[in-house]
Amino acid sequence: MRFSKTESNTGRFRAFVVKEFRHILRDRRTVLILFGMPVVQVLLFGFVLSNEIKNAAIAVLDPSKDVESIALTNKLVSSGYFRLEKNLASVEELEPAFRTGRIKMAVVFPANFAQKLQTGEGQLQLLGDASDPNTATTLINYANAIVADFQQEKNGVAPGRPLIRTETRMRYNPEQKAVFNFVPGVMTLILMLVSAMMTSITIAREKELGTMEILLVSPLKPIQIILGKTAPYLALTLLNATVIVLLGLLVFGMPMRGSVLLLAGECMLYMFVALSLGIFISTRAKDQMSAMFMSALGLLMPTMLLSGFIFPRESMPTALQVVGNVIPATWFNPIVKGIMIKGVGLEVLWKQTLILGGMALFFLALSMKNFKDRLE
Amino acid sequence: MKTVISTDRLTKTYGAFKAVDAITFEVHEGEIFGFLGANGAGKTTALKMLTGLILPTSGHASVAGYDVRKKPEEVKRRIGYMSQKFSLYEDLSVRENIRLFGGIYGLKMSEIRAKTAALLEKLQLVEEADKLVGSLPLGWKQKLSFSVALLHEPRIVFLDEPTSGVDPLTRRQFWELIYETAAAGVTLMVTTHYMDEAEYCNRVSIMVDGRIEALDTPRAMKTAFGAEDMDEVFRKLARGS
Amino acid sequence: MSTLSEKIIKIDKLSKAYGAVKAVENISLSVDQGEIFGIIGPDGAGKTTLFRILTTLLLPDTGSATVAGLDVVRDYKKLRQIIGYMPGRFSLYQDLTVEENLEFFASVFGTSVRKNYDLIAPIYVQIEPFKTRRAGALSGGMKQKLALCCALIHKPEVLFLDEPGTGVDPVSRKEFWDMLRNLRAQGLTMLVSTPYMDEAELCNRVALVQKGEVMAIDTPQGITAAFRQPLFAVRSENMYQLIKDLRNFESASDCYAFGEYAHLKLHPNSASREVLENSIHTYLLSKKHSDIEVKPAVPTVEDCFIELMKN
């Protein structure tokens, strides 16, 4: 009854994966988390955000009232993102307008805007409502994009010298759509959730039910148990990543400027880190509940709060930035943005990729070392 | 003899499944009544109806003089309950547990204090009074938990597999507590998996598939089935179904 | 009969502690090829810890053990190929069907259900009608049978059954022991733990354990034969009063409830059985008991366990 070694090993592996898929598909909660959550999260973040930045009330202080300033104001308003709430007559009116909370942004033109534009001395002040920094940043970025567009039209096809200098500088995302920031963010979160949290819970469940005892007493090697348990989640996570990217592309009109292949590779790398983290947690957690708490507190919260997904890392205290540095999402987030939005490749992203690779090796070694083939 | 529990065609169905199928029986005051049956025979469901935890689908039950459907709160006030699964808070000390359950049943502080002292003395737990319940041996926990179930002087106590897993000596000490309680006029309804314990009961009922298939004294039951012991009675009944 | 080489399990001065709790304390015993060996004791006696050490899941603090000549610490990987283990809570995948559970465990051991079907067939046919039912929806008795099939599917040389009867009704327990006897007839060695004293009689040999220590090792007959004091089964109308009164009987050494009767153990006594019976009877009459019955009792393993605990 002896099988050849490879035959019996592939048979074991297949049986394990089949069993794992059955667990997943038979538990409604798992199915919901795996398939419902990514879609809901992307759509929710996407739409909530795009609603917020549509028809934002702005005020314009325009002492020039010339062709160019009116044209630019019109361009801003006709973009659909802004709604002209008020024309201001003087600088003094700025503060009350903000204080009453009726406007989210103010555009301040200099005197003789058109003339200055001709000489390349165009200046424009964009004021955001700092009580809501996220929205303010977003709106100002939008406005900047529109202003840039306006300049380009003025210059014609030839890239000319800058005509308008605004107070806020452009960042790498030329279109400045906030949803572009969130799709990669949600991706880091979902992949972490599915890979790390679900893996740790599913291993902890076997401990809780006592089936782990039987698996350990069987001739299975620890690596076989780990691979059997994680492989299905690796496949599902990849599927999830695809769904999220597709939603970004098709529903939110995100670009895909870089290499799809590179993105897939980087996703795999990140999932690898997350899976090793999940295995590591499962070596520490004795039941599903503690596995859930450990992954929620140790992985999901930091991923959400410290990686720059929701709150810009630049505005964090140094200590939190340092903590943020050990979170895989901190490095994965710029990779996704870089590939999809900026269209850059490894020549730019090598550092982040190396760090992720290092993390993968470290956590994998750590969890292999901690995964006991006994009960203690 | 006074009747303290009586049921009339008490039934509980879950969909098409009859967990408890029209059971009718009476339990007398001061009686130790064994409530036996295989897993899934409906014991637990019946107990839950009698203790007011779930509503019957049809039929009636009266416990301590109150209808379990209409006056579950009155029923709960007059019964004690001890189960193997939950009894005491493991992370509270012996004293804290007694105080907590005394408080839950509305005992006065002075009563609780007096009862605590008496109880610790009786169970020889004076030295362990401030230890966490989780650190006590299983047998002590069970005795303590039984005593706590008696704290508010209920007329009826339901014991759900109270002696599971303890050594034979402790099991007997526990049964002596049960005898003593019954001698004081308290009615005890006990479920157990140890068939020899069934013989400690005044009367036993055996449930099979939601129905009470036999109800009598252990002695009469053994005679009726021509069996050596209750184990054999049980096997004959359950296998015959 | 058995020579040293036929000892399939050898345990030598095994100890294991969790902090201050001595789960297994200096246990030595050996199990012969092809016997059903019972580890009898209540919860907390150290049964599960002992089983986990023997199944290579835990490391002993001191002492050593071998199963089929393989050291449980050093040769654990080889050992895992040849032992079967059924943990206390049956440990099945509740969301997989009967069939799927069995197939999964077969493939874990690199075999298939078909290959080893003959061994499990007598057990499996009983649950086969429910093969598409999820394990979680089975009754305790059926779960027990399925767990046994899963533990047998790779034809182990030694089978470890940790409290297979816990949470199972007496009917299923009886059927289960019938199955174990059939397996023994096929040459399988089994180590079974149980808190039910009456199951001791179904084993070839037993070890009575309490608080991590072995109190006695013998055949069930040997255990009960060691009980030498006079033992009587006594009955009367009022059991509670009966026990209290009997304890005050002049030559009583111990008295406790035992089924329908109270077992009265007397101090070693040269008086004849009839004389003793009569004096007990007279004593009870003086205490106003009615419906009195006194007869000599054959000591059971449970009587012996109580006796050993008290020493």
Image (cartoon, coloured by chain):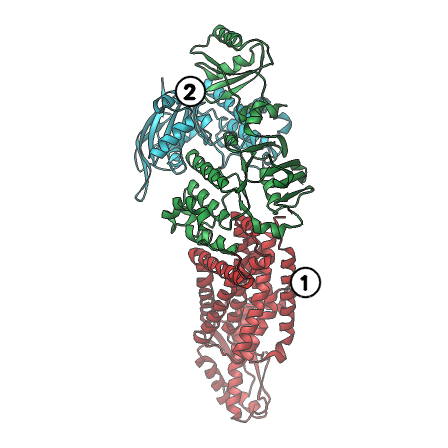
Q: Is residue A93 something one can see in this rendering? A: no
Looking at the image, is A230 positioned above or below residue B64? below
Question: In the figure, what tint was chain A given?
Answer: red
Residue at disc 2, secondary structure:
loop
Amino acid at circle 2 = Gly
Which residue in the protein does label 1 denote?
A: A319
Rendered shade, chain B: cyan
C128 to C271, vertically: above or below: below
Find residue B169 and report its image quarter. top right
Q: Please state the horizontal and vertical placement of residue C66, each as a whole percent of the image.
A: 64, 44
* Circle 2 residue: B30
Q: Residue at x 46, y 60 (%)?
A: A18
Using the rendered view, name the quadrant where residue A115 is placed. Answer: bottom right
| Residue B162 horizontal side relative to residue C55, left or right | left
The one nearer the camera, C296 or A340, is C296
Chain letter, green in picture: C
In the rendered image, the residue lying farthest to the right is C62
Q: Amino acid at mark 1?
A: Ala
* Residue C173, horizontal then vertical, whole percent: 45, 36
Q: Residues within 10 Å of mark 2 (few under 14, many from 20)?
A: many
Residue nearest the viewer, comparing A45 with A24:
A24
What x and y, as percent, mark residue B198? 43, 26
